[in-house]
Image (cartoon, grey):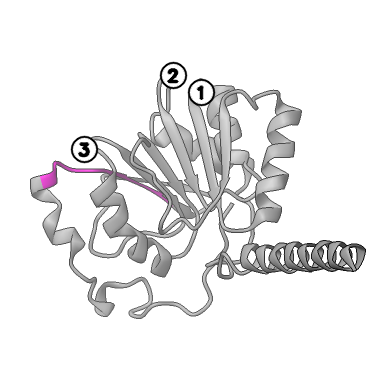
Amino acid sequence: MKRFIYVFIIAFLFIFISVSSIQDVFAQEKKFREPDVLYEPSPQHVVELMLKLANVHKGDIVYDLGCGDGRIVIMAVKLFGATGVGIDIDPIRIEESRQNAGKAGVMNRVTFRNEDLFVADIHEATVVTLFLSQSVNLKLRPKLLRELKPGARVVSYYWDMADWKPDKQIESDDDPIYLWTIPAKKAVRKWLEPCPRSQLFWGEIPDFPLSHP
């Protein structure tokens, strides 16, 4: 009888642990929504132009939101002497980024985080890089203005931020690259207001955003 009770307890614990583990797996799988944009890496020459436009240098902390294969933060570290943080909602992209950083020999200077860019902590960034879509840029804009310190730079390939005009703009193969500098907090309020649809790139939020690096 005691043996039966002992076996029953062991079996119950095994089932409980197994169910809990399965629930954890499903919870992990459901942790994030689908990526906001399709994956398409930025050309390497565009990455270099983005970092030069933002005047990235030693001491900067470069955050790439939607980091893809990690190429922007890897170049920021390797060529410009910065520290890099890549954030992506897709765990496959994060694993690829870490592998690429290992191959480039910069793992001690970069961090890749499997997080939602809308909730990730970005307050320490001195430079933020983007290749998302205009609709995502506009949803992200209040977060950038609230969390980044005055003087931080934001650079976006191809997509602007509608009524928040860039401080500088260059082109690569006829495609624009935009630079903004986070203003003093007292000047931020008007950019936190919803953007009128009439000021968007096509007059409305596009349903087919380009992808991020």
Q: Earlier in the sequence, mark 1 or mark 3?
A: 1
Residues shaded magenta: 177-185
Which residue is drawn at the image coordinates 19% and 59% (left, top)?
Answer: 191
Q: Earlier in the sequence, mark 2 or mark 1?
A: 2
Residue 183 is one of the magenta-drawn residues: yes
Q: Earlier in the sequence, mark 3 or mark 2?
A: 2
Q: Amino acid at mark 3?
A: Pro
Which residue is drawn at the image coordinates 18% and 43% (left, top)?
Answer: 183
Q: Is residue 116 above or below residue 27?
A: above
Mark 2 highlights which residue?
58
Mark 1 highlights which residue?
80
Mark 3 highlights which residue?
150
Residue 55 is one of the magenta-drawn residues: no
Badges 2 and 1: C-beta atoms under 8 Å apart? yes
Secondary structure type for disc 2: loop
Q: Is residue 207 above or below residue 93?
A: below
Which residue is drawn at the image coordinates 26% and 73% (left, top)?
Answer: 199
Q: Which mark is residue 25?
A: none
How much space separates mark 2 and mark 1, taking CA atoms? 6 Å
> Residue 159 appears at what percent x and percent y?
42, 60
